[in-house]
Image (cartoon, coloured by chain):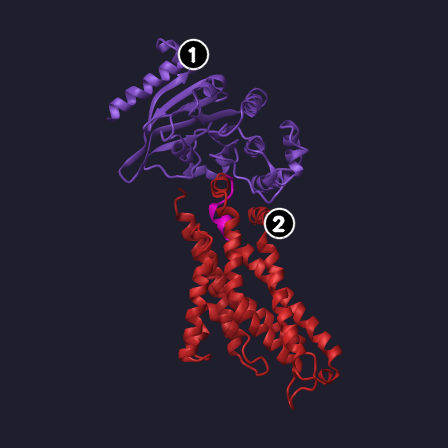
Chain colours: A purple, B red
Amino acid sequence: MGATVESAHVIETTLLTRTFGARVAVDRVNLRVPAGVIYGFLGPNGAGKTTTIRMLLGLTRPTSGSVRLFGETFSRERRKLLQEVGALVEEPSLYPHLTGRENLEIIRRLRNRSRQDVDALLQQFEFASAARDVVATYSSGMRQTLGLAAACLGQPRLLILDEPTNGLDPGATRKLRALLRGQVERHGVTVFVSSHILGEVEQLADWVGIIDHGRLLFQGTLTSLRGARPGSLEDIFLELVASSERASA
Amino acid sequence: MKDLRRVLAAEGLKLRRTLALRLAVLVPVAVLSLQALISTQRPAIPRFGENALVSLGQNAFTLWTLLALPLHGALISALVAAVDHEGDHWKQLFAQPVGVRLLFLVKWVAAFALLLVSSLVLWAGIAGLEEAFRWMKPAWRAAPRPLLLFSTTAIEAYCAAMLFISIQTWISLRFRSFITGPAVAVVAVLVMLGGAARSGGGSLFIRSYPWALPVTAVARLAEPNSGRLVVALLGLFGGLLVMWIGSWTLERREYL
């Protein structure tokens, strides 16, 4: 990313809005994600998390507003930006008739990375032996791990993960958390992770954004969220969501 | 060009162990088996003036282009598209640092490549059958080997098929339902048969209808006919044009 203008925020959206007919899925969202943090994007089901993530990745066009990654817009630098971004949108996108290694090989070819990158990644994720089997035989935890490995291929500076722990048992969730922490601590990656599970975000994230009915209700560090209001984090979250529902009613 | 190579290499890997790859070999083999069965029933001594080997090739190419190819082509293109429709792989692919249009263009290339594999299997099979029947039926040895004629015909039939394969690929990529492409092919074949019955095999309709181009390209092999080349060129350039327009429209669609 040598030519890219360095920005204080890895992700920066301005009045990001997306409507589907009369329904407003994302409503004037201003995200500010600093570099080198795990940013938990928290909200109930249908709050607008996935639509926001799709817009961050350029999969869905905003109705209005803008998205900047590393200070650049998609319209100008799409391919260069995506070289720096690894993504896992909803469930992992894997070809069940291919082995785990072959699935990574497809991403490697598309991202123009070396074979050594795949080997190193399989070592790092302790997945070398499982990668010889076809994906159709994998458990959901193994699929999720492979999906995350695919997102990390080529050492992206930003990981965008949509509900990565969906369908995982507690053991696999813990392993996934450790893998993400490792990416941040060892490689300085910024992680933007969406979830509807408060406990998960609490254990994982440094920063948090709370979204409901398409509107960003809070954005800041986890400490500042705790400090701003009395009660447990769950109470704060439920109060924010309830006040948003009252406002939209 | 480097991007194209990378995306093609990824597409090739995706096709590994797929039904599309198996069908590309199995369907022409089935046609050749049927032709072998038919040829064993033919008289040991050909009619006066008949080149039995040309008849063998004519029958095999007609069986291929009339009965097998329209549905085989539709199935191949639907399976190539289904590799990424199933499991909704598009979101992952569009999040990679490659052009969206390129991701679609290689789907056409994959469909054309699988059709090429089928055409090569058919061509090699016809040549093999020819040798086998020369050995089994000594009277057939008198006729010269029509290898050049069969090679030209296989190339012309392949080029002529590119237009309808291209249309089928566009439909299969545009609509996520697997059945849409083959359903369109069934209707298209019925229209072709209806059109041929109504206006005759040599009509302008049949010489320009995309699904009828391959069978037109292999008609009356024993006679010199420059019309076959025209049909092949129509298929080739029409197919490339549809690929270009199709990938452009797909690139502009919003992924939801």
Identify the subunit bearing mark 1: A
Using the image, determine if residue A159 lies above or below residue B55: above
x and y percentages locating residue B188 in the rendered image: 43, 66
| Magenta portion: prevailing SS class | helix
Q: Dot 2 corresponds to which residue? A: B16
- The numbered dot on residue A223 is 1
x and y percentages locating residue B58 in the rendered image: 59, 77
Taking depth in this image into account, of B34 and B156 the one nearest to the observer is B34
Q: Who's the residue at 46% across and 65% down the image?
A: B238
Q: Quadrant of the C terminus of chain B?
A: top left
The amino acid pointed to by label 2 is Arg
Residue B19 appears left or right of B142? left
Helix, strand or loop status at disc 1 = helix
x and y percentages locating residue A208 in the rendered image: 42, 20
The magenta stretch spans residue B99: yes
Q: Who's the residue at 42% across and 15% down the image?
A: A221
Q: Which residues are magenta?
A: B96-105
Identify the subunit bearing mark 2: B
Q: What is the quadrant of residue A152 in the picture?
A: top right
How many numbered marks does the figure carry?
2
Residue A172 appears left or right of B201? right
Using the image, determine if residue A71 lies above or below residue B11: above
The amino acid pointed to by label 1 is Thr
Using the image, determine if residue B58 lies above or below residue A177: below
x and y percentages locating residue B192 in the rendered image: 44, 71
The Cα–Cα distance between marks 1 and 2, rounded to whole angstroms, is 50 Å
Q: What is the quadrant of residue A124 in the picture?
A: top right
The magenta stretch spans residue A72: no
Nearer the camera: disc 1 or disc 2: 2
Q: Is residue B74 visible?
A: yes
Q: What is the quadrant of residue A146 in the picture?
A: top right
